[in-house]
Image: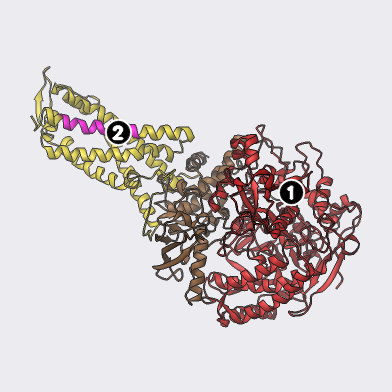
Amino acid sequence: MENNNLTIKLKVWRQENAGAKGKFVDYTIDDVNPDMSFLEMLDELNEELIKKDDLPIEFDNDCREGICGMCGMVINGTAHGPKSGTTTCEVRMRQFKDGETILIEPWRARPFPVIKDLVVDRSAFDRIMVAGGYIDVKTGSAPDAHTVLVPKENADLAMDMAACIGCGACVAACPNASASLFVGAKVSQFALLPQGQPEATKRVEAMVAQMDEEGFGACSNHGECEAVCPKNISILAIARMRREYWKASVH
Amino acid sequence: MRFSTFSYSSLGKKIYMAILGLLLVSFVTVHLIGNLALLSPDKDTFNKYSHFLTHDIGGIILVAEILIFAFFFFHFLYALVVQWNNWKARPIGYKKVKNAGGASKKTIMSTTMIYTGLIIIIWLVIHLLNFKYGEEVMYTTKDGMLIRDLYATVTGYFSNIWNVIFYDVVMILLALHLSHGFWSAFQSLGLNGPRFMKFIRGFGYLYAIVLGAGFVFIPVWVYLTIGGAR
Amino acid sequence: MKLDSKIPGGPLAEKWDKHKFDMKVVNPKNKRKFTVLVVGTGLAGASAAASMAELGYHVKSFCIQDSPRRAHSIGAQGGINAAKNYPNDGDSIWRLFYDTIKGGDYRSREANVYRLAQVSNNIIDQTVAQGVPYQREYGGLLANRSFGGALVSRTFYARGQTGQQLLLGAYSALMAQVHSGMVEILPRREMVELVMINDQARGIIVRNLINGEFERYVGDAVVLATGGYAQVYFLSTNAMNSNASAIWRAHKKGALFGNPCYVQIHPTCIPRSGDYQSKLTLMSESLRNDGRVWVPKKKGDKRPPNEIPEDERDYYLERKYPTFGNMVPRDVASRNAKMVCDEGRGVGKTGLAVYLDFRDAIKEFGREVIEEKYGNLFEMYKMITDEDGYQVPMRIYPAPHYTMGGLWVDYNLMSTIPGLHVIGEANFSDHGANRLGASALMQGLADGYFVLPYTIGNYLGGTKLEKVSTDHEAFKEAEAEAKAKYDKLLSIKGSKTVKEFHQEIGSIMWNYVGMSRNAEGLKKALEEIPRLREEFWQNVKIAGSEDSLNKNLEFAGRVADYLEFGELMAQDALHREESCGGHFREEHQTEEGEALRDDENFTYVAAWEFKGLGKKWELHKEPLEFENVTLTQRSYK
């Protein structure tokens, strides 16, 4: 049988815990099947490391089909790897060349401190959601689903915004480590729906305040976030958030 | 929302910067149009225009100068504050950063706004010292007015090739600054949509090129026709 | 032990309303004196935690991931069923109830399923109000589609991401309650022990996955919403962190396990390509609406698919089931794929795949139409396999997907341990032996939003609960027990990795307790699993230490549980001498090779009691009584 397997060199950020000083460590992994996913390649490396009584590389992952938002690494300088519209778990090894050196770094941002190796703490996102990322509707109190009509165009746009998986790639890729796309997407989803109107001003004010409180940078409209977003969420979400903020400012 | 909440938020600061930026854009546009008077072979055209601004409109000029100064000052002040926070937001940088391409609007211009801005501010001081607060030579126009001969100061300055180069390099930086800043201001204000985005980015680039070319051209023209080259 | 399902009396349609009236109601002032511990933040867990907090209970919500939003409910693509009858095609609560009972092959409780159909409509109302962006028609009304072979259009959907959108809705409700101070979120925590005091579930021990510390939490009731156990197969469509450990450890503390052998194998997954494979990816079964399933007629035919002429292809589903054709239910489609592969007619490098061909559909409707309908799935397929489904037939193979079995619960969703409630996929309740498409989301949310918040009040209001703290002896013991287990795991320092053991148990389960089972194979599994378990406890090799983030250690704990649980699954499958839904016993089939139920002897829920490792589980039967539907043989001919 023909063998197209690759030899891959890795340069991986290793850091024992949040307080420790990290460093890059080199690994070489042979016989990488091009059909493998990037994370499966790391699985294989980890198996080797475990067998050698070395510590495996810790990285977050869960669904491995691009929807849970748990995985995330900066691969060769790009969040979630070279291809647009994908998560790290969707990266396949055939996208790399034989003998290539791949640099792997964790998400870097002050609000995303490293927990270990490539695992970072993204609970800042949850706290932003706690501040206002919801429509307050107590269970059982909702009217019939057809009471309020939603124009299809708005419903579709809201879906585009709601597609955010909260992976944090936007923050990782932003030169300013800004969370504007994440917040903008959520604010926009609710702003586009009639159900979101009653709390609209309160929501955008609270979410933006929490975003600032967490220490994210400001948006300078570089648009890197959109380019790395696995769900291709447009920076027009950020523009809409700013409109909502204007509206809230005169409220 | 309280005014202070708005003003201290990251969104509010960027909104202020955008408004100030657009005001500065209108100022430099008017400035360039005024500068076109330098192209007139009759030096009275430029000097009378200059005299009109400084003497004939009374207190308005003082108000305008204070405002323009404030626009520059606060635009830059906010830039410093925002940039400082942005740097703080990523204490440990990446070993390698690659532009993601595709939908990204990141360019050398967008990432160097703080530096181009800083250079422009420094240059601005020099610019004012050279011209506005430069040597005051008086002369009499053809119709008998005794006014300042700013034309002579300007052409004198641009008779030195190094001054021309220095000025033009800064003007190119200004154009680069605006090529990101112009559309970005609209985005920061939330004034954007799927179709408008294409228009405003295209228009922004066009504006930056036209404005930059105008500012670059005048000293070159002066140098070639009146100044050192002749 | 006598199983009491606590199904209320009266006519089917009135049972739930009557029960709601009969249940004890906790005085609003007293509610805040109660604390409920909810483990898991999927559709069931998040919706339950939020709804209970809205009622005034203090809730602590635990999840294994870094955020509640990541639970694997997020992976559900297709949609959610409800009996709204918006399309006016004759749907009703009764029809949804009937379809679900029939789809479950008559192995579920009538009363539970009817309640599920009743509250299905409230779920749509609730989630729309939360801002879930369902697909809409141009007039602004909600769109519906037909799904999973249903004869009516009752499925609501949000692109191919319905599970994600519903989960984000429940998550946002949860976040609103965190905001109001009623819920505390404890992420990156794995439940390792259930704490029982006075024979009541009163707390849990969790391992903090960041620093490895064991933490104690006390409550007045415990809710498990920890999902299914398909990861016992190693390769499944479940997420990497999905596991059976919480329900398994509760089972070992006395909760009976219901119908563990009922597993759903989804027919349209992308086949595995090598040993390195870590998970299988599901493609929506809507693909079967236009794709034609076939294999070569000749064994071992290695020609590229496009070179195999029409008369040498076997469109086996169309051949065997002329009426339903490629649209037969999941279990039938899966089993037939396995059959043709076992005959040696499987395709691809491994021979473990069948073709799903769009050639004829493209010819008939044009590529554009197909692209519009399934474009994202073709893209996904290409990304994973590097093959273009428009040019060459896709290769598909079944994969474990959902587990109908789970901890046994009564009508109030309480297990046999007082105070321990189990909801969503983690319980055994509503799907019988087979789950219909777009019903998992419905059940998870029904349990969490509309059933448990009522029934838990009945327990809390009607039970004497002693005041206890985490200093109680039972907490110390449970923590010591948990710690001892992890200490032991790390001390073995053998030579085989956790993953290797997981792969081994997975292949035993897949081969003998998978899509089709027989007594011989099951007996073999019952021999091999204890042997493998023994080897595991002597020879497993785990990296790192206990006191820091250590995924290898986390997985070791879970694999250790599969090595016990797998045995119960095999025992249940061996005891059930019939074929029903996801459980197919080769000895029990019709002449045409279809599942053959034995209603006379097996119309019951098998609830197993743990008697200690190495001993046989004790079977308790809950008879299933059908007063409103007549049992028939499923036929898709």
Q: What is the chain letter for disc 2?
A: B
Chain identifier of the yellow chain = B
Around disc 1, counting alpha carbons within 10 Å, would you say few (fewer than 14), some (14 to 19), or many (20 or more)?
A: many
* Magenta stretch, overall SS: helix
Question: In front of the other: label 1 or label 2?
Answer: 1
Q: Name the residue under label 2.
A: B209
Disc 2: CA contacts within 10 A as few (<14), some (14-19) or many (>=20): some
Q: Is C333 included in the stretch rendered in magenta?
A: no
Q: Residue at the location (71% across, 68% down)? A: C247
Say which colour chain A has. brown
Q: Which amino acid does label 2 sit on?
A: Ile
The span picked out in magenta is B205-221
- Image position of A133 with respect to C184: above or below: above
| A78 sits left or right of C139 in the view | left
Q: Can residue C216 be seen in this view?
A: no
Task: State whether residue A118 is above or below residue C441.
Answer: below
Counting from the top left corner in percent of width and height, residue C367 is at: 59, 37
Q: Label 1's element?
A: helix
Question: What hue represents chain C?
Answer: red
The quadrant where residue C403 appears: bottom right
Q: Is mark 2 on a helix, strand or loop?
A: helix
Q: Mark 1 lies on which chain?
A: C
Please count the marks in the image: 2
Magenta region includes residue B215? yes
